[in-house]
Every structure is written in C-alpha cells, then in structure tokens.
Amino acid sequence: MKINKKKVNVSDYILFNRMGDTAAIDIVAPATYSNSGYFNLFDYNKEFAGLSSLSVKIDSKLIFDSFLYIMVEQLKQYCKMNSIHLVVVSENEFFDSYQSYLASHKPGKLRKEKKNIFTAFFEGLGNSAKTVCSDLLKFVEFIGDVAIHIVTLPKNFSQVRWTELPNFLIRVGVNSIGICLLIVFLIGIIIGYVGALQLSRFGVGSFLASLVGIAVTRELSPLMVGIIIAGRTGSAFTAEIGTMRVSDEVDALTSFGFDKQYFLVFPRLIATIISLPLMVSICNIAGIIGGYFAGNAVLNINFAEFQMELLDSSLSYADVLGGIFKSFIFGGIIAVVGCFKGFQVSGGAESVGRYTTSSVVTSIFLIVLVDAVFAFLL
C-alpha cells in the first residue's frame, strides 16, 4: 500500500518530545501491522541525531499485535548501534507477558536429520513398494472400468469417436510397419545365422527352416512388434492424454458429458488391437526371409529347398495362430497401459515425461511377462 507522506501526520501515531540530548516517545495509535506503514514514516536518523538517552512509553490501554514487539526490538538495535541509552516504560501487562514469552522462546537452529544408510535404503524400498502397490490397485481398477465399458459398448456405440479410428490405425499400423519389418527381418537374419552355424556342426542344416519359422512366428515377431509399438505408440498415447490432463481438457470433456473411456481410450484400444495382428502377420514373412538369407549365405541353401523344408517341417498353424493371438493381447496391454499412465499425469511437463517413460517400461515388462506365460501354455 502506497502512503502519501504529505497527507499523514506522524504525530498522530508517535508523539516525540525532545529536550536537548534526551527524548521520549509515546505510542498513541494502535501498534498493529495495518498501521505499520504510518509508523515507518518516523525518521530515526533525523529525530535521534545527537541523542544520548531515549525513553519509550507503552500505555496500558494501547492496542497492539506482534508489530509492536518488532518495533521495540528495532529501536533497541538502533540505540545499541548509536550508543543511545534506551528505557522502555511499559504499563501494559499484556505486552510485558507477550515480550517475556517471545524472549524465552527463541527459535533454535534446524538440525539436519542424519539417516543411517541401511535405514535410508529400507525406507526408500518401502516407499517404492507402497507406490507400486498403489499403482497396481489403480491399474486393476482401470482394467475393470475398461471391461465394464466393453460390456456396455452395444448400448453406447455412438459415444465412441469412430471418426478418429482411421487416423489411429494409420498412426499405429501404417506409420510403424516400416521399422517393424526392418527389425524383424534383422532378427530373422541373426537367428538364421546363429542357427546355421550350430546346425552345420551336427550336419543337420536342413532343419534351419524349421528353427527360423517356429522362432519367428511363435515368439520373436509378436514380441518385437509389441516392444516397438510400446515404445513408439504407447508412449504417444500417454503423452497425448497426459498433456490433455495438464491443460484440463479431460475435465472439460467430462463436464460436457463425454465419457473419457469411449471418447479417448476406445479409439486407441481398437486401433491397436486391429493393427498388431496384421503387422505380426506381415513381419512373420520378413523374419523368415531374413532367416533364408542367412541360411543361403552360410549353408548355401537355395530358396526351393528352404521353402520345401519350411512347409514340410514341424511349423504348424498352431504356431502361427498362437503368435497372432498373442499380438491381440499385446495390443490391448499397450493401449490400456498407455491410456492409464496418461490419466495419471498431474502437474506439468515434468509429470508428462515421467509417466511417458513409466508407460514404456511398464508395457514392455508386461509384454515380456505375458509372453513368458504363453510360452508354457501355447
């Protein structure tokens, strides 16, 4: 608050009487923070020049708060620095008791808490366990919410944003197929090369087609495509929804009557579940071709021999369909985890980055875990 010094009479707040080198101050207005600006207009340097003694009177009926104590302490410091003898004459018993209370309760130095390294380790471990259990509970609740919306989808078919589905299909499938084909093709070359070297030692190089076919179609193609999509698309889902959370767009959609599951989650979930099996089917071919190139380079197997062995081998429809079925599950995991982590974002950009990273790590972990389970079941 700005105070016009010309319109304020300081004597209405502080009566200052001076006789030679002795002076007296009488506080006449309420000494409160609301009046602190007026009290601060009193010029100590000008009025106290040449003083040797000063007395301050505090009336018994004076209204005050903690500002009076601060003002008295400032006067004591000023007088001490300028060798002025100060006498505080207090007739206010409330101020005396308040002053004695504050004088006896001076704040001490804050001590840093020293933690034993083992205590700190187990404390951090416990906090991490609490966070994991809390996130797991929320994730299960989110999966249950998605399941309920799937059951009620026929009744709420029009609430899904179907116009965005082609866009997500392009983003998840078409834009990702190139890198997926390349990775699975290179994985096929690696498996074919390593397998050819080992099989040639035992004189059974003809089994290379069976090795590559089963390894690619049943395990490697679904697993690699799932990991790539988790890093490329799952993280994008988290970042998009997280940014909407930060800017309160999700709350705005809810207030307008849109169901966030149907409006935000389902287009992404459906697009991912449709795209992954198609991509895995195409990548199976790329991986097998990669294995053929490796076999041709190491064992000099021609394409006709490789094809004949592949068709006559133990590779069955169950292997191919098992890998495609797993890709359905992986697609659901990627979409659900990506959207769930996006809805967990709160705060600002730092939170978006943290949960985007968590989304990728969680998706890859669950994909590998589910793949390990299916390895024993299928």
Image (cartoon, rainbow, N blue to C red):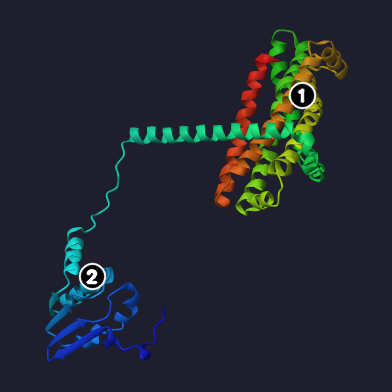
Q: Mark 2 Cα within 10 Å, few/some/many (few <14, many 20+)? A: some
Residue at 34%, 34% (x, y): give it.
119
* Kind of residue indicated by mark 2: Tyr
- Of all residues, the one furthest to the front in this rendering is 61
Q: Nearer the viewer, mark 1 or mark 2?
A: 2
Quadrant containing the N terminus in the rendered view: bottom left
- Of all residues, the one furthest to the right in this rendering is 304
Label placed on residue 356: none
Choose between 43 and 92: the one closer to the eye.
Answer: 92
Q: Which residue is mark 2?
A: 69
The x and y percentages for residue 22 are 12, 87
Q: Which residue is mark 1?
A: 324
- Compared to 45, does 36 lie above or below? above
Q: Quadrant of residue 56?
A: bottom left
* Kind of residue indicated by mark 1: Ile
Residue at 75%, 19% (x, y): give it.
322
Q: In the rendered image, is residue 192 in sight?
A: no
CA distance for labels 1 and 2 = 79 Å
